[in-house]
Amino acid sequence: MRIFYICQRVPFPPNRGDKITTFNEIRHLAVAHDVHVFCLGDGPEDLDNVPPLLEYVKTVTAVPVTPWDTRRGALKALLTGRPLSVSAYRKAKLHEAIKQEYEELKPDLIFAYSSNAAQYAEHFPSVPRIMQFADLDSLKWGQYAERAAIPMKWLYSLEQRRLLEYERHLARTFSHALVCTDLEQQDFKRLIPGAPVSRVGNGVDLEYFRPQGGVKTRASVIFTGVMDYLPNVDAVVWFCDAVLPIIQAQVPEASFMICGSSPSAAVLELATRPGVTVTGRVPDMRPFLDSAEILVAPMRMGRGIQNKVLEGLAMGLPCITSIAAWNGTVIPQGEGILATDDPRLFAEHVVRLFGDDPYRADMGRKGRLQVETHYGWDAQLKVLDRVIAQVTRRPSVESSAATA
């Protein structure tokens, strides 16, 4: 089968949330199908990631988008009534490229990852199309609005309304929709009743992310992520303001490492506080995870499965998370994860894990077992195969193998 796969960034390397999912889906699909990738580039430098991706797929068509492009597109949307986040990623060159390739290649299926990228699939209503909502982003914008002051509160609320209408349009005109958690599936059915939807969860590379046996830094906590992303910024600022002082009052040597690319000014300021380190981009996250004793994910905004949590658990780290971050998983509390939104209880969990080596080690083992049981990529992507078989009326790869 010939598949057009459309996404917002070049899906390589798998080093951030959306790239992790898109790369693993594309690699899986390319085993049995001819996959042609159409994407934007996260700045011109993202185009350097195209050549290694070509080891997996037939072609890659990438058009870079700059911060100026996104700002200009969003401003235009204020006048046109389109969602700002969709208009921000509208590039005429990519629209024309995919229409031209469609005429030449006639795909059997078009797959769009995220509402920002779905616009490029709307030209082809006669082809089976799958819409993968990375999240229902309208709900995320609503979360932003709850915490913002005017005028940003007004702008975020406007985007929430516009994007929800667009998400409804996509879900009702595409062949099938995908979400990644049970909670998102419940939200989808509540907000867009009647549209076909399935859950395809995230996974983690269990061979790549595994305990390395490195020396642990005593009383160390780590947070990982792209550090200009608002939910990540909000999470580490809250942790440093509300939780870390309580921990350090009981464990003065406690340290907090913020590990990830593009730290914002607010994140860089945190490095001036006692015990806090901001690394910026690192070539390999694993040594930093391996040297820490605990991973935290105190996400107050954002939805879905947090890849940072899956990677931390796979590395044998006990994880302390917000309720929202825990709700994105199927892992029971106490099985590698402890979840709370209360800063004092959050600190108590950290201090207990610092002070009880057998308990900390047991939590790490339980967390690793949970991701091995629930979050291998092969199990997640079998669902994707079944959805593709359904919308194209073809046997899934799994079914074909069983009858061969």
Image (tube, rainbow, N blue to C red):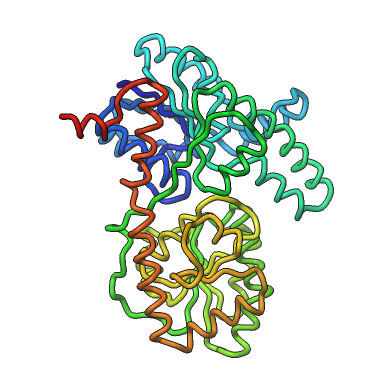
Q: Residue at x 34, y 40 (%)?
A: 382
Counting the numbered discs, the total is 0
Query: Where 166 falls versus 214 (above or below)?
Result: above
Image quadrant where one finds the N terminus: top left
Q: Residue at x 64, y 83 (%)?
A: 246
x and y percentages locating residue 119 in the rendered image: 56, 24
Specify the farthest residue to the left: 404
Query: Where 249 falls versus 397 (above or below)?
Result: below
x and y percentages locating residue 97 in the rendered image: 45, 18
- Residue 129 visible to an observer of this rendering: yes
Q: Nearer the viewer, residue 293 or 271?
A: 293
x and y percentages locating residue 69 in the rendered image: 61, 32
Image quadrant where one finds the C terminus: top left
Specify the farthest residue to the top: 103
- Residue 43 visible to an observer of this rendering: no
Specify the farthest residue to the right: 150
Q: Nearer the viewer, residue 71 or 189?
A: 189
Q: Residue at x 51, y 21 (%)?
A: 121
x and y percentages locating residue 93 in the rendered image: 51, 20
Q: Is residue 233 left or right of residue 79?
A: left
Query: Where 132 falls versus 321 (above or below)?
Result: above
- Name the quadrant containing residue 384: top left
Q: Is residue 404 left or right of residue 289?
A: left
- Name the quadrant containing residue 111: top left
Q: Nearer the viewer, residue 231 or 263?
A: 231
